[in-house]
Image: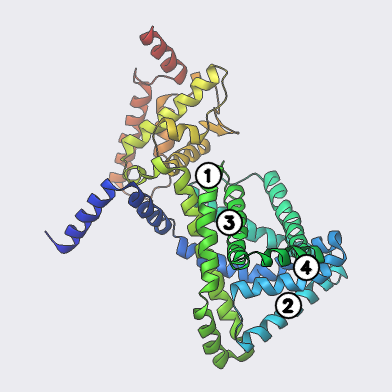
Amino acid sequence: MSIRASIRSRVRRLLEKNRAAQFVYLTVQGFVDNRCPARAAGLAYTTLLALVPLLAVVFAFSKSLLKESSVKVAPVVLDKLLEYIAPGQVEVAAAARQETIEKIQSFIGNIEAGALGTIGTLALLLVAIRLLMTIEQAFNDIWGIAQGRSVWRRVVYYWTALTLGPVLLIGAVAVTGTTEFAGLTGRLRALPGAEKFLLKLLPFVLLWGGFTFLYAAMPNTAVRFRAALMGGIVGGSLWQINNLLNAMYVSRVVTYSKIYGGLGIIPVFLVGLYCAWLIVLFGAQVSCAAQNARACFQQRAGNQLDQLARERLACQVVLAACQRFLNSQPAPTTEELAATLAAAPQLLNRLVHRLAEGGILVAAGGLVPARPPENITLADVLHVLRTGPVPGAAGADADRVGQLLAALQAAERAAPANLNFREILQSSRGSTD
């Protein structure tokens, strides 16, 4: 036995005995399989391009609501945001941060003065919305959701994120600057040992809450609070630890400032964004694994299912949807079917997406038949799963193979076993009676 095979055997035995080790392994494996490092790089680049327009839009909205508070607090929020992503213990970084803040504030002033015009303002909104769409797509891919939100739901969600989020953030910063808050912190400092503990704990708690909300709201699926909280704790903790261990950023600033001068903050900022998105996506993977703990243990086996097993699972999904429909019961969700059929959610979501594209099912809050069950046969389901783009082939042999496959498909449809789903349910009731 080779060394590599021996190591794999030992790892397999360890995973079979320890479910916690299985969870960690499958989380990391999912992080790699979903190409999260590559996604983080793409999101970092997109964020770098969209960050200034996004900040300009959200601060313009918040300024119209918070009036004086926004004017005073916006520079503080911008400084903290830039410091979180690219820490500034070096003078060059501090000067570059200050210049960036001034540019953003000038950009906001141009929006308020109408200098950009209607088309320019709409372009800013589109850039900001595009960033949110990219984030949602990354989260949906982690959760195995093939279809994103509808246009109307995206408008509602994104408008809330662009307006309410900044208002709450700036409002919180404004509150912390009041005399009442200063008096509260003074009383806390009077308690023995409380100051150091609370000051260290507060950033973690705030980040846990923010990440939990992100993981609960962003994917286009129902995320349980416990799963979102687990991902939020992991993501928020890693984020804060990353900010504390900023020696890498500082060394980068020193190196790049010698090469690029005042522009040295740009590559540092990009590296900081990449690390930040790695943490966010890893927390999302933890949240997904926490909600689908049992299915995650079956995920690798699910990915190795052959075509026959996938076709059988798809037929079971359609059968469950038709049964609920004929019994006038609530339509089943993919989460319910994943638990009932002991199937990996990612695989089930892919099958449901194929069935919806093929006109077999409709995902409308739950899974319902796209047409009456008596008009859906087993062969219809198999045809949808087997249909897809094929490489072009020419020649007499290719034509002959195509003719034979068409004849085989016709024979399959004419077979006595090709029942429609109403007949299948009626026959199962008859056998039960």
Residue occupying image coordinates x 62% and y 51%: 213
Disc 1/disc 2 C-alpha distance (Å): 38 Å
First in residue order: circle 1 vs circle 2: 2
Residue 57 at least partly seen = no
Check disc 4 and report the residue beneath it.
177
Q: Nearer the viewer, mark 4 or mark 1?
A: 4
Q: Is residue 220 left or right of residue 397?
A: right
Check disc 3 and report the residue beneath it.
208
Q: Which is nearer the eye, 409 or 357?
A: 357
What amino acid type is highlighted by mark number 2? Ile
| Residue 389 drawn at (x, y percent) | 43, 47
Residue 45 at least partly seen = yes
Q: Is residue 35 left or right of residue 169?
A: left
What amino acid type is highlighted by mark number 3? Trp
Q: Nearer the viewer, mark 4 or mark 2?
A: 4
Residue occupying image coordinates x 62% and y 56%: 210
Residue occupying image coordinates x 52% and y 84%: 252
Residues under numbered marks 3 and 4 in contact, where contact means CB atoms less than 8 Å apart: no
Q: Which mark is residue 68?
A: none
Check disc 2 and report the residue beneath it.
101
Secondary structure at badge 2 equals helix
Q: Nearer the viewer, mark 3 or mark 2?
A: 3
Disc 3/disc 4 C-alpha distance (Å): 22 Å
Residues under numbered marks 3 and 1 in contact, where contact means CB atoms less than 8 Å apart: no
